[in-house]
Amino acid sequence: MSRKPDTAAPRVAVIGSGSWGTTFGKVLADGGAHVTMWARRAELAHEIREGKRNSQYLPGINLPRSMTATHQLAEALDGAEQVYLAVSSQALRENLTAIRPLLAEGSMPVVSLMKGVEKRSGLRMSQVIEQELGCDPNRIAVASGPNLALEIARQQPTAAVIASASQETAEAVARRSRNAYFRSFVNTDVIGTEFGGVLKNLIAVAIGIVDGVGYGENTKASIITRGLVEMTDFAVAQGAQPETLQGLAGLGDLIATCQSPLSRNNTAGRLLGQGYSFQDVVKQMDQTAEGLASVAPVLQLARAAGIRMPIVEQVKMVLDGTMNPRDIAPHLTTDDDKPTGERTHHGDDSSSGAFRRAFQRALDQFRHGRGGAAGDRP
C-alpha cells in the first residue's frame, strides 16, 4: 500500500522513467520517500505526474500519490537527498554531462540501477559515474538482484543487494529502498555486484536462444550452471568476491532473468533463436536489452584477463550471424573437446563444495520457479 505524500518525507530523484526506473520509484515511494521522476519525454512525465500511470512501460499499475514527474532535470534534482540513475547504460555518460552541474555542490548518494558496461570503454556504470561526476566513490552505490520490474510493480515480494565502497552509504540507500514487499541487503563488493547484474544478462540471452530454437530444460539447466561458472571466473578476475556471485546479484538474478518471459534479455535471445537477425530484434524490442550491448566489451575484458567464456563467445557468434542458433547448444557448455573438471578456474578444494551447493540451488530453483539468494548481509 502506498503512503500519502508527506512534506517532511525524504526527497529522492529517479533519473529515467522506463519500466525499471518507474518501478524503483514506486519502491522508494512505498517506503516513505517523496519521489520525483525525470522523464525524457514531457508527455510521459505528465502521465506519471497527473495520471499516476506509466501505461507504456507498466500497464495496469497505479503509482503512489507520493510520486511525481518532470522532464526538467533541475526540477527533478532540486532538494534530492539521494539520486537514482535508471537510463540506458550506453546513454549514461551523455545524461551525466547534463546532471553534473546540478550536483556540483552536493554530497548525496548517487545510485546506479543499471546493469550494463559501456561499450566503447568497457567501464562499469559506477566507474562512469565516478569519472563523469568527479565524485568520491564512497558516494556511489549500485543496486542489483532478481528484480523483474513488472513483478515488483505488482508488489510481489523480492530482494535486492545494495553495494558501495562505503558501508555507510550502502546502508543509507538500503534503508531508503525497502518496504513491505522489497527487502534490501548490503555488501561492499561493488565489482561483483555490478558484474553479476551484467553477466547474467548474457547468459539469459543464451537461454533465450535455445528456448527459441526449441531445446528443453536439460539444455537450459546446463547453460545456467556453466554460466554461473563463467560469471564467477570473470568477476573474480576483475577483483570481485566469489561469494557475491552466489548471492542476489549473481545466482538470484541469473535464475530470475533466465526463467522469466518478462526478461528483456531472455526475449531478445528467444527472437534470435527463432531466426530473427540482430537488427530485427533491436527493432522489435520496446526497451533496451542491456545484454546485447554488453557482449563485446565483456569478451574484450575476458580476453585481456585470460578468462575463457565459451557460452558468451557463442552468443556473440549468433549475434554476428556467423552461427546458426540451432548449432549453438553443443558448444555452450565447453570450450573444446578435451574433458575438463567442473570447478571454476579460481576455485580451490575448500571452495568447491560451496560452488557445488550453489549450482544445485540454481538447478532446483530453476526447475521449481523459485528465486533465492545467499551471501548478502541484511
Image (spheres, rainbow, N blue to C red):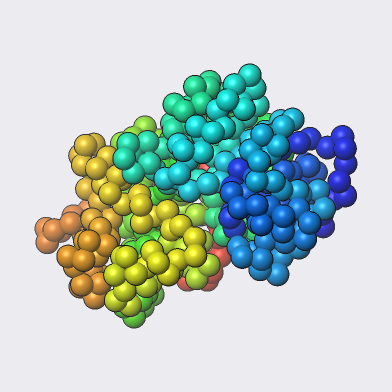
Image position of 77 with respect to 290: above or below: above
Image position of 235 with respect to 220: above or below: above
Q: Where residue 2 sits in the image (x, y, percent)?
A: 82, 54
Q: Quadrant of residue 219?
A: bottom left
Q: Which residue is at the front of the view, 287 or 228?
A: 287
Q: Where residue 63 sits in the image (x, y, percent)?
A: 75, 58
Q: Which residue is at the front of the view, 308 or 327?
A: 327
Q: Where residue 32 sits in the image (x, y, percent)?
A: 80, 43
Q: Residue at x 26, y 47 (%)?
A: 299
Q: Which residue is at the front of the view, 204 or 338?
A: 204
Q: Is residue 239 left or right of residue 246?
A: left
Tell me the quarter of the image containing the N terminus: bottom right
Image position of 328 with respect to 234: above or below: below
Of all residues, the one furthest to the front in this rendering is 42
Q: Quadrant of residue 175?
A: top right
Q: Residue at x 44, y 33 (%)?
A: 128
Q: Is residue 212 left or right of residue 1?
A: left
Image position of 207 with respect to 304: above or below: below
Q: Is residue 70 left or right of residue 206?
A: right
Q: Where residue 60 sits in the image (x, y, percent)?
A: 70, 69
Q: Residue at x 82, y 53 (%)?
A: 65
